[in-house]
Amino acid sequence: MRMRTFTGDSLSAVMADVRRTLGPDAVIITSGDAPGGGVEVRAAAERGAISAPAEDSATALARRDAARTRARGDSSAGLTRIARALDWHQVPGQAGKHLLDAAMAMEDGEATATLARALDQRYGVHPVEPDPGRAILLAGAPGSGKSSCAARLAARACAQGVRPRLISADAKAGAREQLAAYAAALELEYEAVDGPRELSAVLARPGPDPVIIDAPGVNAFELDDLDDLADLAYAADAELIAVIEAGLAPGDAEDACALFAAIGAGRAIVTKLDAARRRGALLAPGEAGLAYAHISASPFIGSGLAPATALRLARALLEDDAGAEDGS
């Protein structure tokens, strides 16, 4: 039921308003004098029946896909395709201008290769090594995919014959259980800690190296969160790697990356490209001075975390396929 209160100078005027708003089948619940004078009526009506959708989900998706490929310039070539794609992804003006200028200077006719060369000229890539030589601390907003990235990095290390240790510092409900399940599936040592002091004590004990730490989810725009994150990284002598969702607003993503860089991050992993169509945030780490470590385009632990390359970044901007298939 929908219930509303109506007031007016006269009962006839209020009833007309009731019928106009709730329809002819409205039920009068109460009527009387309004506190400020005039008439007050409380009326209700059944919620309207849910109408059948104009098109099914498959048709709606196909229509939107077709509209996207047109707007993104998929049928264009060369610089035109690059320019339209950058505009579609809502790439911030400065980044778009620099990439277009670089592409114009080196255009070879094939859009993907040209954009890849422009990206390679502007940004750095540095995938996480199977044994990076020091602890890794993955930092990002709640739900950004930190735990999944920790498990995927561990799985990649295992494939190279390295057996890392997984540590959860995230006390959010379910976070520790999730990482513990990943560790069990990979048959890796797992520990949970509360705060920098416990983390330092755990790392002081003998155990497998390298160490991959899942930090608590943080709001990069909150100074206290950043301070806590910096304390955790210091306690572990860990390299801080930012985890950024591809679907964020590009400006917000760049600001977050810059703030992570301010407390020591040097690399970033961009996640959830499969769930984003406008991927302007993909360029945020590079614009903030971070190197690209990996990009992720799958919800599955066994796949989807690929070492970042300029070609993969270009494909993610020019094609539906995020270019993040698992690979070495």
Image (spheres, grey):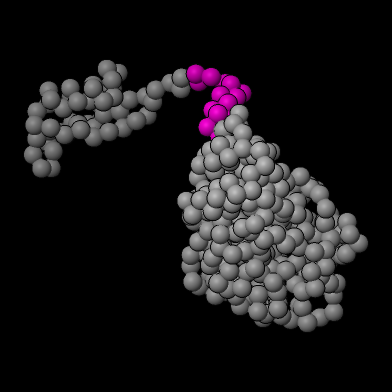
Q: Is residue 47 above or below residue 282?
A: above
Identity of the residue drawn at 61% across and 58% down: 122
Identity of the residue drawn at 58% across and 69% down: 261
In the rendered image, which quarter is residue 215 located in? bottom right
Q: Is residue 299 above or below residue 307?
A: above
Identity of the residue drawn at 76% across and 44% down: 325
Please state the horizontal and vertical placement of residue 154, each as a whole percent of the image: 80, 60
Seen in the image, is 306 located left or right of residue 64?
A: right
The region drawn magenta spans: 53-72
Question: Is-magenta flag for residue 61?
Answer: yes
Of residue 206 and residue 66, the one placed in the foreground of this image is: 66
Of residue 319 and residue 83, the one placed in the foreground of this image is: 83
Q: Quadrant of the N terminus?
A: top left
Please state the horizontal and vertical placement of residue 232, each as a whole percent of the image: 64, 75
Please state the horizontal and vertical placement of residue 317, each as a whole percent of the image: 62, 43
Seen in the image, is 35 located left or right of residue 310?
A: left
Main SS class of the magenta portion in the image = helix
